[in-house]
Amino acid sequence: MTAVRRRRSADNGLVSWLVDTDRMEAALAAILAILVVVLDAVTRQPWQPMALDLIACAVAAVTPRWPRAAGVALGAVLATYVLMPAPWATLGEYTLLIPILGTGMRGHRRTRAAMTAGYFVILAAISWNDAPPGRNPVIGWVLWAVLIGALWLIGNVFLATAEAHRKARRADLLLQRQAIARDLHDTVARSLARVVMATERARIHGFASDSDLATIADAAGRGNEELRWVMAILHDPAESPQLGAAAETPLEHALADAESELRRHGFSVAVSVHGPLERLTAEQAEVLGAVTAEAAENIVKHAEPDTACAVILDIDDLAAQLVFVNRPGPRPPDTGQFASMGLRNIRDRLARVGGELSVDDDPEQWTTHIFVPLATVGSPPERVA
């Protein structure tokens, strides 16, 4: 899980990855150490200030791992700069800013406040010591305060942005879990329902026909495969593929599969398509394909067996209308929340494309009407079904 978390942080940005893996301070300290070596070599400074600067960089790099011990050690190293001779030029005092920035970006407010208070005293003392005779060191103190304040602001903004991304990710995961719940109904529950129906037919007839046995074997095998998909998604829902074939089936294939499935269960099916499927966008075709599979399964489960039913698709310039007509079967005595799960799934899917669902639940005829508005004439679909 750590590897996955680090890979996702890298995908969100290099800075986020550095902060989440506690490498921000090490990266900044390494950059400062390179500047120290280059500038000291160019200006031919004595080796003592360069050694102290490199020690300060090394200690600053490990402050995320040991914030208290390394933070105190860094302050002790930089406190020696107060006694440093004036001709010695140093960059080590900037290492005090590195842990202030890092703790702020991680939201460690108390640690940042403690470091700021202690380090500002050290920086003020260094400014006092470096101020030329007759110059007021207050200007240096103000500059350090402004710089530290800017680092506080950067840390707060980064933390707020990261928290917003985390909340958005949690919302996305919630939507994914809702989609998984719908897919569970569309796939695993559908396969199990076929097994139950075939078993019930065999029980009523007193024997299992070859067709019933084939249905049970096919549905059980498909359910086993779908359960593996479910486990893959639950293991890592952010990176796993979408569950099941229903959500990915093009509309034309979904209509053909629905007709085949209904005929296999004894229904007399009439499928009628008016208008070109190319007018649908990819998302509209995907949603209507999933809705078709769901509606066909509802007919199998709830319609009067061995009766006629119809599937009508009408596409014009303004809308796509999908209508399912069937004769309702006897109502089960425990009709309740679970009986409406299929219609609820259809409504949830249609909401993605601004579609609407209406049901005419007449005792003699059940009509399910799906309406999906199409893009205007000036907005061509991004991909045909």
Image (cartoon, helix red, strand yellow):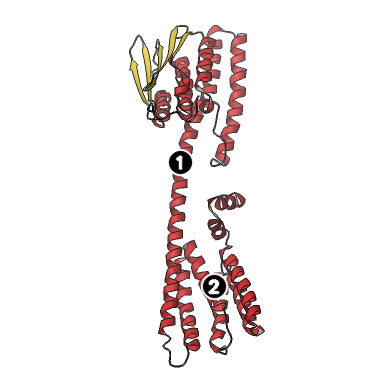
Q: Residue at x 48, y 33 (%)?
A: 181
Judged left or right of residue 374, residue 130 is right
Q: Amino acid at mark 2?
A: Arg
Q: Nearer the viewer, residue 27 or 19?
A: 27
Other residues around mark 2 within 10 Å, as few (<14) / some (14–19) / many (≥20): some
355 or 5, which lies in front? Answer: 355
**Camera-side residue: 316 or 29?**
316
Residue 84 coordinates in the image, percent (x, y): 57, 88
Q: CA distance from mark 2 to mark 1?
A: 38 Å
Q: Quadrant of residue 27?
A: bottom right
Residue beneath disc 2: 68
Give the mark nearer the N terminus: 2 vs 1: 2
Circle 1 residue: 174
Q: Residue furthest bottom?
A: 133
Circle 1 packing at 10 Å, graded few (<14), some (14-19), many (20+), is few
Q: Position of residue 189 (x, y in %)?
A: 51, 25
- What x and y, as percent, mark residue 71? 54, 74
Q: Which mark is residue 66?
A: none
Q: Is residue 361 left or right of residue 112?
A: left
Where is 127 relative to 170, above or below? below
At label 1, the amino acid type is Leu
Which corner quadrant of the image does residue 302 belong to? top left
The residue depicted at 46 percent of the width and 78 percent of the height is: 120
Circle 2: element type: helix
**28 or 215, which is in the foreground?**
28
Residue extending furthest toward the front: 378
- Please state the horizontal and vertical placement of residue 53, each as a whole percent of the image: 60, 78
Mark 2 touches mark 1? (CB < 8 Å): no
In the image, is residue 242 above or below residue 163?
Answer: above
Q: Considering the numbered disc 1 on the image, is that residue within a helix, a strand or a loop?
A: helix
